[in-house]
């Protein structure tokens, strides 16, 4: 439909962008664009220092850090739980990191490696994530991040949990 125009705040800030067609969203920190303009099929971002054509696989040569954080879950139980195993089905050419968040405390990252494909025809794989033993809690979250700006597509995260013998 020709041209579109959008306005955002004039200072660098956090931006959440929603795609109404795919129902997906992204969050950007230190967002510098204050306006957008679409001309034909091209989109341009406007900052106080100029107008920039938007596109490409990176951010001025730097890989784009991306992550997905699940909602907090108690797995339908109101007791202390422990995580038996996690299964991640995803696609990446450089692996991923999973950060386990239990009762609002972030634990160490667990590195998820995928079979190397040389960056060509990257396959979807299901990886078993080694969850640290002894971790218990009532509220669980999982943060899956890319490594070094590599492309990461996450399809499903399956979590097997068990009830702890301890109580709150």
Image (spheres, rainbow, N blue to C red):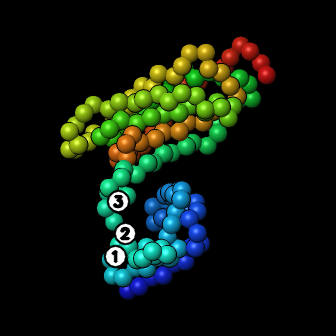
According to the image, label 3 marks what residue?
60
Q: Quadrant of residue 96?
A: top left
- The answer for how far apart the CA atoms under marks 3 and 1 are is 18 Å
Viewer-side label of 3, 2: 3
Residue pointed to by mark 2:
54
The residue that appears at 57% across and 42% down in the rendered structure is 70
Q: Residues within 10 Å of mark 1 (few under 14, many from 20)?
A: few
- Tell which of 103 and 163 is nearer to you: 103
Identity of the residue furthest to the bottom in this view: 2
Q: Name the residue tied to disc 1.
A: 42
Front-lying residue, 44 or 30: 30
Apparent side of residue 73 relative to residue 151 in the rendered image (left or right) = right
Residue visible at 23% across and 43% down in the picture: 119
Crowd class of label 2 (few under 14; some 14 to 19; many from 20; radius 10 Å)? few
Seen as rendered, the residue at the extreme right is 168
Residue 124 visible in the snapshot: no
**In the rendered image, which quarter is residue 137 located in?**
top right
Would you say the residues marked 1 and 2 are in contact, meaning their CB atoms lie under 8 Å apart? yes
Image coordinates of residue 73 in percent, x first then y, are: 64, 36
Residue 114 percent coordinates (x, y): 32, 32
Q: How far apart in space, not on screen, are marks 3 and 2 (Cα)? A: 11 Å
- Chain-order first, disc 3 or disc 2: 2
Q: Viewer-nearest of labels 1 and 2?
A: 2
Judging from the image, what secondary structure is the residue with disc 2 in? loop
Q: CA distance from mark 1 to mark 2?
A: 7 Å
In the rendered structure, which disc, 1 or 2, sits on the residue that comes first in sequence? 1
| Residue drawn where x is 31% and y is 61% of the image | 56
């Amino acid at each position: 439909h020709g041209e579109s125009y959008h306005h955002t705040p004039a200072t660098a800030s956090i931006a959440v962008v929603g795609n109404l067609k795919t129902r997906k969203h992204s969050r950007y920190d230190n967002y510098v664009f204050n306006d957008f303009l679409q001309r034909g099929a091209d989109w341009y971002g406007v900052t106080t220092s100029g107008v920039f054509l938007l596109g490409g696989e990176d951010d001025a040569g730097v890989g784009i850090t991306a992550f997905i954080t699940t909602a907090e879950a108690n797995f339908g139980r109101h007791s202390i739980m422990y995580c038996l195993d996690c299964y991640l089905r995803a696609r990446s050419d450089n692996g991923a990191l999973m950060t386990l968040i239990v009762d609002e405390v972030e634990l160490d990252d667990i590195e998820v490696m995928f079979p190397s494909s040389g960056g060509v025809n990257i396959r979807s794989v299901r990886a078993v994530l080694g969850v640290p033993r002894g971790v218990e809690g009532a509220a669980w979250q999982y943060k899956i991040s890319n490594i070094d700006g590599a492309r990461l597509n996450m399809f499903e995260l399956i979590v097997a949990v068990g009830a702890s013998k301890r109580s709150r």
